[in-house]
Image (cartoon, grey):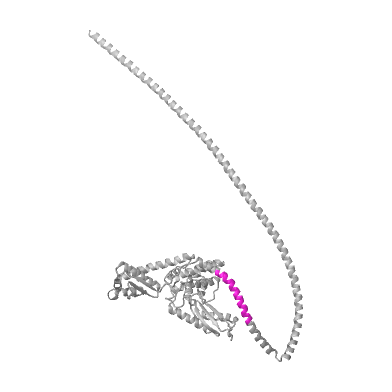
């Protein structure tokens, strides 16, 4: 029984093992089958993707090849167009150069023909000159023979005349010379007057044209300036503040500026007086700033004056540069530029020297341009002609000498120096530009309203003018008119004839130039009038 049971149990276990083994084999087979199926599916998918990629690559290659062909075609077309363009330009340039060469060839041929003609003409002239020289030599011999014959006859005639006239040769010569000199002097005076009149008529026309054109282009207003500065006050109480306690403020201001302050009964006005225009301007600006600020005491005054002096130095430099740029000249020394700027605060006969110098430079430059001369030289000399007036109150000598020394010091050209020295006739002008500076200076100073004089100086100058003209022999009356710009001299007709009036006018003008100082020019008008009076009874 037990044996059966054991046998049945063993049998049952064997069956279970077999089933398990079969199941295991089945699982392995299924796994292997799945592996191969998955591998095959993966391979199919991979092959499909590779096919798509290859198709894309093929399409991209086809597209690239199409674009490449299009670009190649386009590049070929552009190259052909460029080549055609270059070829056309080359043909056009070649044609133009060919035409130019043909024109040059024609000109050369024409010049050669002209030279040949000129050579033939010169040869003919040389032949004619040779013939004339031969004729002159022959005529010279004939003239010598005739001269010898005439001299012999002349000696015989002199001997006969001495016998008839009962005069020696020297006495007759002296008498004849005196008569001829009187007649010649009269004839020469008449001819000189006629020639001068003709020259004046022609010169006046051209000069008036040039000067009027220059003045027209350089028209500017003039206003006479005074030698004192006036500072307005807001009220009369400000005068006491300016004076200060025991006069401390006004003394501090006068010491700091070197300018005298005149505080009188004139309402709401303070007058600044001083010979130095720059210092007077410093004082004016300083006083105006102190009045505007309201703080007026010695320390504040000194501080304000020093500040204004620095501002004035900068302003002077800017003024000089402005004048240089306005005229259109460059390359001036910095010190000369500063001196130009100082001229803005300098006056002459009431005329601002800064504006006067600019105007003279412009007038001289315009006249030089009309005459075809050196415009830059004329402008430079005109601008610097009164440079000495910037420091003439500080240095000894005339403004001409000082100006020439300044120009030499800062390496200006000899022509500029000569123009400075000659603009008042102290030396002879060496260039036409120097003469133009003289004329421009006279024009600028003589224009209406440009300059002024005090009544005392004016009357004194008129009296001197009449006195000089009246001092000549044969003068009957003398009148200074046109504000001293003209003097009319009436002569005695029985003592001075028409020819002598010409020399009298020149002598009077020369003496006026030597003894008088005056702006512009003075016209000397000599008048001779002869009247025949008879009474009917």
Q: In which quarter of the image is the N terminus?
A: top left
Q: In which quarter of the image is residue 279?
A: bottom left
Q: In which quarter of the image is residue 121?
A: bottom right
337 displayed left or right of 161: left
Q: How many marks?
A: 0
- Residue 401 at x, y = what percent? 48, 76
36 displayed left or right of 473: left
- Residue 222 at x, y = what percent? 45, 69
- Choose between 328 and 50: the one closer to the eye: 328
Q: Can the viewer see residue 283 in this picture?
A: no
- Residue 478 at x, y = what percent? 51, 82
Magenta span has 264? no
What residue lies at 71% left-to-right and 90% top-to-bottom?
Answer: 165
Q: Could you tell me what secondary structure mostly forms the magenta stretch?
A: helix
Q: In which quarter of the image is residue 310?
A: bottom left
**In the image, residue 18 above or below residue 71:** above
409 displayed left or right of 146: left
Residue most toward the front?
537
- Residue 517 at x, y = what percent? 48, 78
- Choose between 448 and 18: the one closer to the eye: 448
Q: Can the viewer see residue 459 in this picture?
A: yes
Magenta span has 187? yes
**In the image, residue 398 above or below residue 214:** below
What residue lies at 35% left-to-right and 68% top-to-bottom?
Answer: 307
What residue lies at 65% left-to-right and 86% top-to-bottom?
Answer: 178
- Choose between 137 and 459: the one closer to the eye: 459
**In the image, residue 491 above or below residue 287:** below
Magenta residues span: 186-208
- Choose between 115 and 484: the one closer to the eye: 484
Residue most toward the bottom?
166
Q: Quadrant of the C terminus?
A: bottom right
């Amino acid at each position: 029984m037990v044996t059966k049971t054991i046998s049945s149990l063993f049998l049952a276990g064997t069956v279970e093992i077999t089933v398990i083994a079969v199941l295991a084999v089945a699982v392995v087979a299924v796994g292997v089958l799945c592996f191969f199926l998955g591998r095959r599916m993966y391979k199919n998918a991979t092959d499909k993707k590779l096919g798509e990629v290859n198709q894309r690559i093929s399409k991209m290659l086809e597209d690239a090849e199409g674009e490449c062909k299009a670009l190649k075609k386009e590049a070929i077309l552009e190259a052909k167009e460029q080549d055609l363009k270059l070829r056309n330009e080359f043909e056009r340039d070649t044609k133009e150069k060919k035409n130019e060469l043909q024109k040059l060839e024609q000109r050369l041929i024409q010049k050669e023909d002209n030279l040949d003609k000129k050579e033939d003409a010169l040869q003919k002239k040389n032949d004619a000159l040779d013939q004339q020289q031969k004729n002159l030599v022959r005529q010279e011999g004939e003239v010598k023979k005739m001269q010898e014959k005439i001299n012999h006859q002349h000696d015989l005639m002199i001997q006969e005349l001495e016998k008839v006239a009962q005069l020696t040769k020297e006495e007759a010569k002296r008498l004849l010379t005196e008569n001829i000199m009187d007649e010649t002097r009269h004839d020469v005076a008449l001819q000189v007057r006629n020639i001068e009149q003709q020259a004046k008529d022609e010169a006046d026309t051209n000069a008036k044209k040039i000067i009027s054109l220059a003045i027209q282009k350089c028209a500017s207003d003039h206003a006479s300036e005074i030698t004192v500065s006036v500072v307005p006050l807001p009220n009369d109480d400000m005068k006491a503040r300016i004076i200060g306690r025991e006069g401390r403020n006004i003394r501090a201001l006068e010491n700091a500026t070197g300018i005298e302050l005149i505080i009188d009964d004139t309402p709401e006005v303070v007058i600044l007086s001083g010979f130095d225009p720059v210092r007077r301007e410093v004082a004016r600006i300083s006083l105006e700033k102190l009045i505007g600020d309201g703080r007026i005491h010695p320390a504040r005054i000194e501080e304000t004056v020093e500040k204004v002096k620095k501002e004035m130095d900068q302003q002077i430099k800017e003024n000089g540069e402005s004048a240089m740029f306005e005229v259109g000249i460059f390359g001036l020394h910095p010190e000369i530029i500063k001196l130009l700027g100082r001229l803005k605060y300098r006056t002459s006969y009431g005329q601002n020297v800064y504006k006067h110098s600019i105007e003279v430079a412009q007038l001289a430059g315009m006249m030089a341009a009309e005459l075809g001369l050196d415009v830059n030289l004329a402008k430079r000399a005109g601008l610097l002609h009164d440079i000495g007036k910037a420091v003439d109150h500080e240095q000894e000598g005339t403004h001409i000498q000082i100006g020439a020394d300044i120009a030499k010091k800062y390496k200006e050209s000899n022509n500029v120096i000569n123009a400075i020295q000659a603009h008042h006739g102290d030396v002879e002008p060496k260039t036409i530009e120097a003469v133009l500076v003289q004329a421009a200076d006279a024009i600028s100073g003589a224009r209406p309203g440009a300059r002024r004089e005090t009544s005392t100086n004016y009357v004194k100058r008129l009296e001197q003018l009449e006195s000089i003209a009246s001092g000549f022999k044969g003068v009957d009356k003398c009148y200074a008119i046109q504000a001293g710009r003209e003097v009319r001299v009436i002569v005695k007709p029985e003592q001075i004839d028409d020819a002598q009036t010409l020399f009298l006018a020149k002598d009077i003008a020369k003496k006026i130039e030597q003894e008088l100082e005056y702006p512009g020019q003075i016209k000397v008008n000599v008048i001779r009038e002869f009247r025949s009076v008879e009474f009917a009874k």
